[in-house]
Amino acid sequence: MTQHRTRFGSIEKYEKGGVQVINDDPRNYVFSNIFEVASKSEPYEKVAVGKNLKYVLEAVRAEGTSAWYAAGHDEAAIVMDGEVEIRLVKPDTPLVSEDHEGTTMLEGNPKGRRMGHIIARRGHMALLPKGAAYQFHATKPGVILLQTLRGDLTVERWKDICQK
Amino acid sequence: MPETKATDQKANEYGYRSFLLGKFRFERDEYFAHLAWPDGSHTIQVDAFLRALMRDISWNFFYGIVNFDGVFGTTNHYGNVDVFAGLYNAGYTNQNKQYVENFNSEQVRDLFAAMLDDWTNEGFDPFAAPAETGSPFGSKHGSNRAAITRKRLVAERMVGLAGDIAKRSDAAGNPVNRQFVDVNQDEPEVHAEPGFENEVHAFNFFAYVSRSDVTWNPSVCSAVKESQVCATTEEFMLPIIHGNDRVEWFVQLTDEIHWDIQDRDTGVPRARVIMKPGDVAAMPADIRHQGYSPKRSMLLVWENNDSTLPELYAKKRLKPNPVDF
């Protein structure tokens, strides 16, 4: 009986597919690879790899300790490679208005109650709840796929990351 | 609205009932579903027909067009549904041979559900990969109601939160699929301070997906406003050809899927998209696609659930491709 082996990617080892055009423009498919994007990103740079009007999926290279962030809406983080610690604080006063879209970077450390922390590894999904301040920490380079809205910190460099 | 009913309450010689949906007639025999409408008819292998019918019902007609094959299918108008033959096939439309009827969504869903129930034999699960289920062929023998009445899972916020979709486990009757036995089942370490137990939350998303007992059936795992991260396990081939009414995105989480991309309205081939772990691709709003997954794989399907989008794309107020660069 065949023993099936599940194939994953990582920042150190990935293999891209691609668009094989018959009668089309490959740019229509906005084709990229999150591990390749993260391998060429600065730590915690939030590079859009998917964009659906105001919504984005961002590839984030997790390495070292990030700034503190907050958003006026939930965000979701999927660890695609490595191990990432997520530290959460409930601010004493709201840091971001509910109608502000995307992630906001905070100055310094937020004042408030410790909510707890999460240690997430490949395949784990974590909630970044609206209104909470959060910080990432990764001892070794890892990759986060972030479900959020396009915001001030979203980096769009489609020409550099996509098949043309 | 046109009449919708099961006909011939007496079963045919193979034990199956026939069904009428307006002027569409549906019959099955041991191997095929036979479809007929005024001035036309069509034959579909019954296993393919039942797999497509299962998705169409379960997804509540999904986003846009569910082509059972190159001829027959449904178009969702969110409250009412077009049932068509040849409408998105250049060979038919060039000769004005297409046929369409519009119905209330509930009418179609009820009739399709009755047809699926009657035509699905014991041992055949239309949601399963062919290698893990029995045969749909032959004369009628039994039924498989448990397999065809699964509820689509839609997380309001995130899987595993209190009051939301529950995580999967052996104890809950969700064993790891035979092709994902090597997927790590460890849970994240969640250390919540008192009072924050339902805010400090994480779960093993890949383990959750590895325990799915259905194929080609996206379920919502996390939602950020109208942004829905859906996960699905794919094996063999997508039983329908999905015609988009908005942009959707795919992220290949594991293994590999090959997509055939065609023009949505004519079926003319446009591209092939080969996706490997970590690959991200948009499916533009003016294409149809069908995927092939040689090994069971995990696919993240990212949807924008904004109900105003189909009209905006149809009226060309939004471009079919999501990004210009």
Image (cartoon, rainbow, N blue to C red):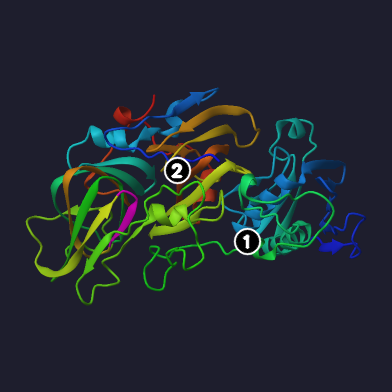
Relative side of B20 to A94, left or right? right
Residue at 87% in and 58% down: B15
- Quadrant position of residue A87: bottom left
Q: Residue most toward the front?
A: A1
Relative side of A128 to B259, left or right? left
Is A124 covered by the magenta stretch? yes
Quarter the C terminus of chain B occupies: top left
Task: Name which of mark 2 and mark 1 comes first in the sequence.
Answer: 1
Secondary structure beneath label 1: loop
Q: Which residue is mark 2?
A: B249
Alpha carbon separation for disc pair 2 and 1: 25 Å
Q: Is residue B146 visible?
A: yes
Circle 2 residues within 10 Å: few <14, some 14–19, many ≥20: many
Quarter the N terminus of chain B occupies: bottom right
Q: A99 and B57: which one is in front?
A: B57
The x, y position of residue B134, in whole percent, is 70, 51
Q: Residue most toward the left?
A: A108
